[in-house]
Amino acid sequence: ELKKYNPILRKMTIHKEIK
C-alpha cells in the first residue's frame, strides 16, 4: 500500500482506516 508511505495520503487515509 503506497498510501501508507505517503504522509499526506496517510492522514487522509487515516479517516478511512478508522472505518
Image (cartoon, rainbow, N blue to C red):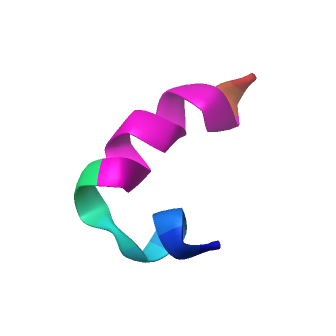
The magenta span reads: 9-17
Q: Viewed as shown, does residue 6 lie left or right of 16? A: left
Q: Quadrant of the C terminus?
A: top right
Which residue is depicted at the point 27% across and 62% down?
7
Q: What secondary structure is the stretch in magenta mostly built from?
A: helix
Which residue is depicted at the point 52% across and 27% down?
15
Which of the 4 image quarters holds residue 18? top right
Asked if 5 appears above or below 12 in the picture, the reply is below
Q: Quadrant of the N terminus?
A: bottom right
Which residue is depicted at the point 39% across and 36% down?
12
Asked if 7 appears above or below 19 in the picture, the reply is below
Residue 6 lies within the magenta run? no
Q: Viewed as shown, does residue 14 lie left or right of 11? A: right
Q: Position of residue 11 (x, y in %)?
A: 35, 43
Q: Viewed as shown, does residue 15 lie left or right of 17? A: left
Asked if 11 appears above or below 10 in the picture, the reply is above
Q: Viewed as shown, does residue 4 lie left or right of 17? A: left
Furthest-right residue in view? Answer: 19
Asked if 2 appears above or below 19 in the picture, the reply is below
